[in-house]
Image (tube, rainbow, N blue to C red):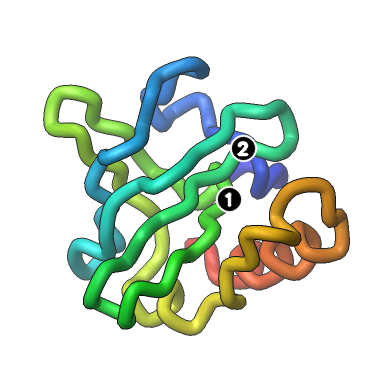
Amino acid sequence: MSDNIWGYQATTGHTAGTDLIGYKVEATDGSIGKVDKHSDDVNSSYLVVDTGVWIFGKHVLLPAGTVRTVDTAERKIHVDLTKEQIKDSPEFDKDKHVGDAGYHQQIGDYYQGHRS
């Protein structure tokens, strides 16, 4: 697995510029929600996932390095995390996620320690 938690792995099948909004997101043990927002920025690629009623409308920020595969035919993204790991992740902060290096470090450190 790549050391860059904020970049897509070459094996995911993701092509930069592909609109992922609305794609279903699958953890290793089931569905967690849909992509609400995403970025392909170099060294800052991520998904914002709306978990809906699963964890009471919480949004989570998933670094691109947690993505295992992107299935454009089925509009699904598989991530290398369990539902519990995602549920326990730091709260998504829409005001901090752009331009706050400390916030990205906190999120990155959490997921870096939970990747398989």
Crowding around mark 2 (Cα neighbors within 10 Å: few <14, some 14 to 19, many 20+) is some
Tell me which residue sits at (53%, 33%) in the image: 9
Tell me the distance, in whole angstroms, between the alpha carbons under discs 1 and 2.
Answer: 6 Å
- Place residue 51 in its image quadrant: bottom left
- Residue ranking furthest to the front: 95
Residue corresponding to mark 2: 45
How many numbered marks are there? 2
Tell me which residue sits at (46%, 42%) in the image: 37
In percent of width and height, residue 2 lies at 63, 42
Callouts 1 and 2 close, C-beta under 8 Å: yes
Q: What element carries label 1?
A: strand
Q: Which mark is residue 63?
A: 1
Q: Is mark 2 on a helix, strand or loop?
A: loop
Q: In the displayed structure, would residue 91 be above or below residue 116?
A: below
Crowding around mark 1 (Cα neighbors within 10 Å: few <14, some 14 to 19, many 20+) is many
Q: In the rendered view, does 86 fall on the left or right side of 54? A: right
In percent of width and height, residue 28 lies at 28, 63
In percent of width and height, residue 47 lies at 49, 46
Q: Residue type at mark 2?
A: Ser
Q: Earlier in the sequence, mark 1 or mark 2?
A: 2
Q: In the displayed structure, would residue 101 be above or below residue 91?
A: above
Tell me which residue sits at (75%, 60%) in the image: 96
Q: In the rendered view, does 61 fall on the left or right side of 34? A: right
- Place residue 57 in its image quadrant: bottom left
Q: In the rendered view, does 25 fall on the left or right side of 39? A: left
Q: In which quarter of the image is the N terminus?
A: top right
- Place residue 15 in its image quadrant: top left
Tell me which residue sits at (22%, 69%) in the image: 29
In percent of width and height, residue 105 lies at 80, 62
Q: Residue type at mark 1?
A: Pro
